[in-house]
Image (cartoon, rainbow, N blue to C red):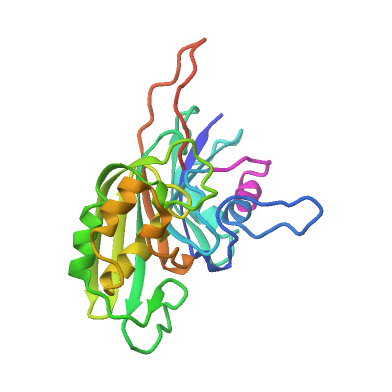
Amino acid sequence: MPRYKITVAYEGTDFHGWQKQEPLGRLVLRTAQGVLEDAVTRVVREPVVLTGASRTDAGVHAHGQVAAFTTTRDIPAVKLPRAITARCPADIQVREAEVVPEHFDPIAHATNKEYHYLIQHGPHLPPLFDRRTIWRTHHDLDPDLMNVAARGLVGRHDFAAFAQASHGRESTVRELYHCEVHAIDPNRLRIEVRGNGFLYHMVRIIAGTLVEIGRGAFPVENITRALETGERRCCGPTLGPQGLCLKWIHHEIPEPPRSGEESGAESDP
């Protein structure tokens, strides 16, 4: 049976995150996975299970979420983006589709991913047309100072201080390959964070910490203290979801396990 990998974009404001949520005895919550799975089912005309690579939170956006499904229907991959998107609401669409090996796992085979966090800063009028995709602070921020702090996060560290208490992971060690702050214009910043995996709210806490440093409330040295001590009080607040966007996810698909062998991959969305 063919297995398809799809690249998905969504404006996350009106979604309760990526992961499908069907609380017993309560209304089914609107999620990106649930909406997309319904659209795919209507295209292939049979039930499918859609697996996503990253479980974005409520209100978080995506340009390059990756998901996969298997079906008995043999459909040219080039036709899927338009067919699925036509059956989706306006705030989600499939950008690309391709056939992948049957053993492809979008979670286990993800090698790195990148998030962006957009900020408007300073005493200006609030954003209007893009107000649902940017976070705002009245404080003026120093992007150069924020970049000095951001460089201290690059590398393999224990990011326990930068995770929500209920992160649910056995290990809080992750590796960041890239963390930079870019001044888009005099009152807008973009924080870019790339790594091999992220803890619950990790990017939003990193952004909150860099904001505190950028406005002069924290010294740059708080980054080192947070990594060394694991103490949450060394970090800034968890910023709102509206500024966060999953930009892309890269995958490496290994050879399928031989008969009698199991893949030892550990998922880390």
Front residue (pair 206, 220): 220
Q: Quadrant of residue 86?
A: bottom right
Q: Is residue 174 left or right of residue 99?
A: left
Q: Quadrant of residue 197?
A: top left
Task: Verify whether residue 29 appears in magenta.
Answer: no
Residue 74, percent from left and from top: 55, 36
- 36 versus 239 height, above or below: above
Q: Residue furthest right?
A: 25
Q: Residue furthest top?
A: 260
Residue 160, percent from left and from top: 41, 46
Q: Residue at x 38, y 30 (%)?
A: 253
Q: Is residue 261 left or right of residue 156?
A: right
Task: Verify whether residue 48 appears in magenta.
Answer: yes
Front residue (pair 93, 234): 234
Q: Residue at x 51, y 49 (%)?
A: 55
Front residue (pair 246, 171): 171
Q: Is residue 230 left or right of residue 86?
A: left
Labels in figure, total: 0
Front residue (pair 207, 12): 207
Quadrant placement of the N terminus:
top right
Residue 186, percent from left and from top: 22, 80
Residue 172, percent from left and from top: 42, 41
Q: Residue at x 37, y 60 (%)?
A: 235
Q: Which residues are magenta?
A: 37-51
Q: Residue at x 54, y 42 (%)?
A: 168
